[in-house]
Image (cartoon, rainbow, N blue to C red):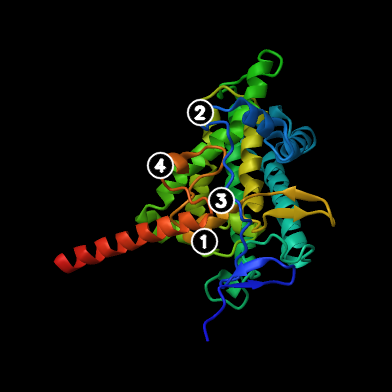
Amino acid sequence: MARPKTTTDEHGQIRDRRGEWRSGRPVFLEPLLDFPTNPKRIFKWLFGIPGFLFPWFSIFMVIITISYLFFTPELSRMQNFEIGWMAEIALRNLVLLTLCTGGLHLWLCRWKKQGRIKKYNGNWMAKNSPTFLFNDQVKDNVFLSIVSGATIWSLYECVLWWGYANELMPFSGIVNNPIWFALGMFLVPIWRNFHFYWIHRLLHWKPLYDRVHFIHHKNVNVGPWSGMAMHPVEHLFYFSCMLIHVIVPSHPLHMLFNGIQTGIGPGLSHSGFDEIMLGDEKALKNDRYMHYLHHRYHNVNFGESNVPLDKWFGSLHDGTPEADEHFRRVHTAKVQAQQAKSESS
């Protein structure tokens, strides 16, 4: 008897035979860099809910403001590399990572507050699996995120703070240049995603993938802690987006935003859920389906949705059946070409 192609889960959601749920809509690409330009769509994206400013950008603004005012050492202390202030930076980042990513994990995966509602993959995190350190996916992910990820993030930040303290960094103040300050905040996530696309493509170069990036891709079924579960070399590449501040005049708040979003943002993009339910009728739109498809298929969606490089370079899988068929044909043609080459050699 043939297996059914779809099933209905306990929440009434349609899942395929792999247990995967799809939203039924194509991957959303932000309209800022879409052509022809549509001012109405851009305005709605900027100020709508959900949109660019609300809720996630605003949440990050609150986090970096509190971090800067209350949990960052005075600049005068950072003129020399000393354990005291550097440990404060590292502790702050560790706490942020634990509260944000760990809290998301507890809500979605440990306490399962919304069950499998809007969960892309119907399975939970792997246990008793030799694929992962400690035979446990969550323990593996937490270990790599904290021991390697938070450490390298903090080292980058400490070096840049030292540069600001010693007036070695190109600086742009709030009072002297308020327009650039505001525009810089807007550009940080766009720069970060531009950088991520190219670094990510580099990490899929076979020598780097086989030795480094495969660690991250062990997480086919992703959870919040999967986002920062990387090889240390990958963390060095990943957080190198912060080096833009060595070249471009910026305020330390720009650098702080860049680092914090790079450090805790992956928890959201790897949550595995399309929405984060806050009650029976309230939810925070997450919409990270684009990156989930990257973990599902590996060779698509190398970037994020606000810089459409995947669309421009032909690697966009928009989640539709047509995209499934297109990339299936691409994969088949690639395999056949490799076989032909092997037979002829």
Q: Which residue is mark 3?
A: 290
User: Quarter of the image holding residue 41?
Assistant: top right
The type of residue carrying mark 1 is: Arg
The type of residue carrying mark 2 is: Pro
Secondary structure of the residue carrying tag 1 is helix
Upstream in sequence: badge 3 or badge 1:
3
The type of residue carrying mark 3 is: Met
Distance CA(mark 1)–CA(mark 4): 19 Å
Q: Are marks 2 and 3 in contact (CB under 8 Å)?
A: no
Decide if residue 144 is on the left or right side of residue 202.
right
Q: Which residue is mark 1?
A: 296
Q: Name the image quarter holding the C terminus.
A: bottom left
Q: Residues within 10 Å of mark 1 (few under 14, many from 20)?
A: some
Upstream in sequence: badge 4 or badge 3:
3
- The reply to whether residue 57 is in sight is yes
Q: Are marks 4 and 2 in contact (CB under 8 Å)?
A: no
Q: Which residue is mark 4?
A: 313
Q: Residues within 10 Å of mark 2 (few under 14, many from 20)?
A: few
Give the camera-side residue of 207 and 344.
344
Distance CA(mark 2)–CA(mark 3): 22 Å
| Circle on res. 36 | 2
Residue at 36%, 59% (x, y): give it: 329
Secondary structure of the residue carrying tag 3 is helix
The type of residue carrying mark 4 is: Phe
Where does the image place residue 214, in percent across and percent down from the top left?
Answer: 46, 61
Where does the image place residue 78, in percent across and percent down from the top left?
Answer: 66, 32
